[in-house]
Image (cartoon, grey):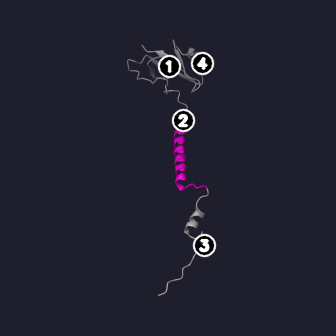
Amino acid sequence: MSHPPVVRRAPGDGRAARRAAAAPPSGRTGRGRGAWIAVLAVLLVGGTAAGGWWYVHKEDGGPRIHEGDCLRDRATIDQDPVKCEDPAARFIVVERVQGTTFSGVCDSVPGDPIALASDPTVESFVLCLAARK
């Protein structure tokens, strides 16, 4: 039996040479790229969620208080309305005037109204309150 002839290849002609030629020149592997893609995806999703929350809440000047709502006190606009049947309800909103923080707008409201102005950097409005009896 005769053996097949041995073929000798020049160095750099085999599979190892082809793999080396196909490798990225920077030496980075696919794992590094995948980690960057994951980080970017998390930032994109988080940024989108934060932007959506800001868009929905950007016009919130605190709770949405309207005419006919009752409040516990007249010290702050950042309070939740209470049910008018609640014994803690000390004031009722007689009028809500949008687009201003000038408390003089309540002077035209009959009775002895109490003006409560919003923070103008958030939203401009004045609540004209009357004491509950």
Which residue corresponds to the image point at 49% horizontal and 86% vertical from the top-left?
A: 2
Q: Mark 3 or mark 2: which comes first in sequence?
A: 3
Per the rendering, the mark at residue 102 is 4
Q: Mark 4 or mark 2: which comes first in sequence?
A: 2
Q: Could you classify mark 2 by the number of other residues whose Cα lies within 10 Å: few (under 14), some (14-19), or many (20 or more)?
A: few
- Reading the image, the residue beneath label 2 is 54
Q: Secondary structure at mark 3?
A: loop
Query: In this orientation, which residue lies closer to the viewer: 15 or 86?
Result: 15
Per the rendering, the mark at residue 10 is 3
Determine whether 99 is above or below 36 in the image: above
Query: In this orientation, which residue lies closer to the viewer: 74 or 67?
Result: 74
Q: Could you classify mark 4 by the number of other residues whose Cα lies within 10 Å: few (under 14), some (14-19), or many (20 or more)?
A: some
Report the mark closest to the observer, 1 or 4.
1
Q: Which residues are magenta?
A: 26-53
- Reading the image, the residue beneath label 1 is 76
State the CA–CA distance, disc 2 to disc 1.
23 Å
Give yes or no for contact between labels 2 and 1 (Cβ–Cβ under 8 Å): no
Q: Could you classify mark 1 by the number of other residues whose Cα lies within 10 Å: few (under 14), some (14-19), or many (20 or more)?
A: few
State the CA–CA distance, disc 4 to disc 2.
27 Å
